[in-house]
Amino acid sequence: MEHYKVVLPADLNDYGSLFGGTLLKWVDEIAYIRVSLDFPGQHFVTIGLDNVEFRHPIRKGQILRFRCKKSRVGKTSVTYNVRVFGARYNTESEEVLFENNITFVCVDGNGVKTQISKER
């Protein structure tokens, strides 16, 4: 799944770069959409992100392309790899600005970890 976001002035720190926390929020949101579509009717919560390393500054006006792919499905958890590319000037650019693995755990209505049902 691919998704796009534009970096607006409100997303920037006082050095003119995208706040790291804003990028992590977008990664979490986009991966959550993907897990919700892959496993409809089930509930997931984020339990972890891999080591976070920001490779390049991201500036105002940049259009970011997020590529989210499932990388592992366990009994109660699922992991997605999310890559972020700059798409404003070259929509086919494969330079990775940020990459991370994010893991979700399936929970029941009481928030207790439960087994994942078959994906669609």
Image: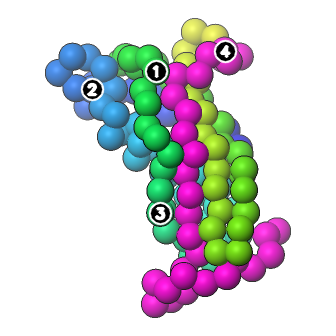
Under mark 1, the amino acid is Arg
Q: Amino acid at mark 3?
A: Ile
- Residue located beneath label 1 in the image: 55
Circle 4 is placed at which residue position?
A: 93
Q: Tell me the residue at 79%/70% (across/down).
A: 119
Say which quarter of the image contains residue 72. Answer: bottom right
Residue placed most toward the observer, 18 or 73: 73
Which residue in the rendered view is the most extreme toward the left? Answer: 14
Instruction: Check residue 47 in the rendering and tell me which mark sits there, or answer none.
Output: 3
Q: Nearer the viewer, residue 111 or 88?
A: 111
* Disc 4 element: loop
Q: Nearer the viewer, mark 2 or mark 1?
A: 1
Sequence-wise, the earlier of marks 4 and 3 is 3
Q: Is residue 108 magenta?
A: yes
In the image, the segment drawn in magenta is: 91-120
Residue 5 vs residue 71: left or right?
Answer: left
- Kindly report the distance in space between the C-alpha atoms of the residues bearing marks 2 and 1: 16 Å
